[in-house]
Image (cartoon, grey):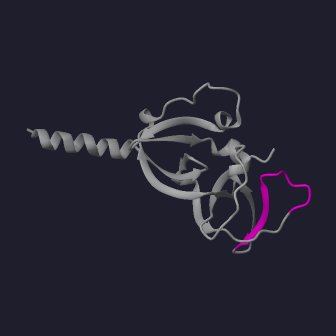
Amino acid sequence: MQTQDEKQEEIDQEAVEESEEFLTFRLGQEEYAVSIMRVKEIRAWEPVTRVPHAKPWECGLINVRGAIVPIIDLRKRIGLADLTYTKHTVVIMFGLENAGRERVQGAVVDALTDVARLLPSQVQPSPQLNRGRQVHFAQGVVEHEGRMIVMLDLLKALDAG
C-alpha cells in the first residue's frame, strides 16, 4: 500500500511525463514560447547577406556549416518596431518540416528568458481581441510563474509568404 507521499510523487512524475519543454524569449515587452523540440541551436547575431526585394522582416542569409539559412527578424514579422541589434541579440535556429524534409530557418529575438515545462492543459486558446498580427501568430497563451506567455505559432510566424 502506497503512502500519501508516494502517491503524490507518482502524480508529479506523470505530470512531468505529459509536460513539454518550451524555450521562452522576449520581443519588446512581451514573452513568447516555442516548443524546444523545434530549436536546433542558438547563435549570437552575425551579419547576413542581404537578398534583393526581400520583405521588411527578412534579414538575409547566413552560412551555417555549409548550409544556407534564411534569417528573419521576428520582431518585425509580428509588427513591432525596429530594434538595433547588439552583441546581446540572439538568433534561434529552428528545424521545420517541409515536403518530408527538414529545413532550418533562423529568427532574431530580443533576448532568451527561460526554458519552461508546461502541461497542455495550462495553455488557453488565443484571445479574440482583434485581427492584429500578434493574435494571428498566437496559438495560445499560458500564465507561468506570474508571467503571461504567448505560445507562438511558429509555422505562421516563419512563413515568408
Relative to 9, 104 lies left or right: right
Rendered view: 128 above or below 49 = above
Q: Position of residue 56 (x, y in %)?
A: 82, 52
Q: Using the image as rendered, state which of residue 64 and residue 114 is in the foreground.
A: 114
Q: What is the tally of numbered marks visible in this picture?
A: 0
* Quadrant of residue 119 within the rendered picture: top left
Q: Position of residue 9 (x, y in %)?
A: 21, 45
Relative side of 13 to 147, left or right:
left
Quadrant including the C terminus = top right
Query: Residue 39 or 44: which is nearer the viewer?
Result: 44
Q: Is residue 63 magenta?
A: yes
Residue at the far bottom: name it. Answer: 65
Q: Toward which corner of the image does residue 18 lie, by quadrant?
A: top left
Query: On screen, 93 above or below 79?
Result: below
Horizontally, residue 137 falls left or right of residue 160, namely left
Nearer to the camera, 119 or 10: 119
Q: Which residues are magenta?
A: 51-64
Q: What residue is drawn where x is 65% and y is 67%?
A: 86
- In this view, which residue lies farthest toward the right? 53
| Residue at left offset 58%, top offset 28% | 127
Asked whether residue 98 appears in the rendered view, the answer is no
Q: Is residue 62 covered in magenta?
A: yes
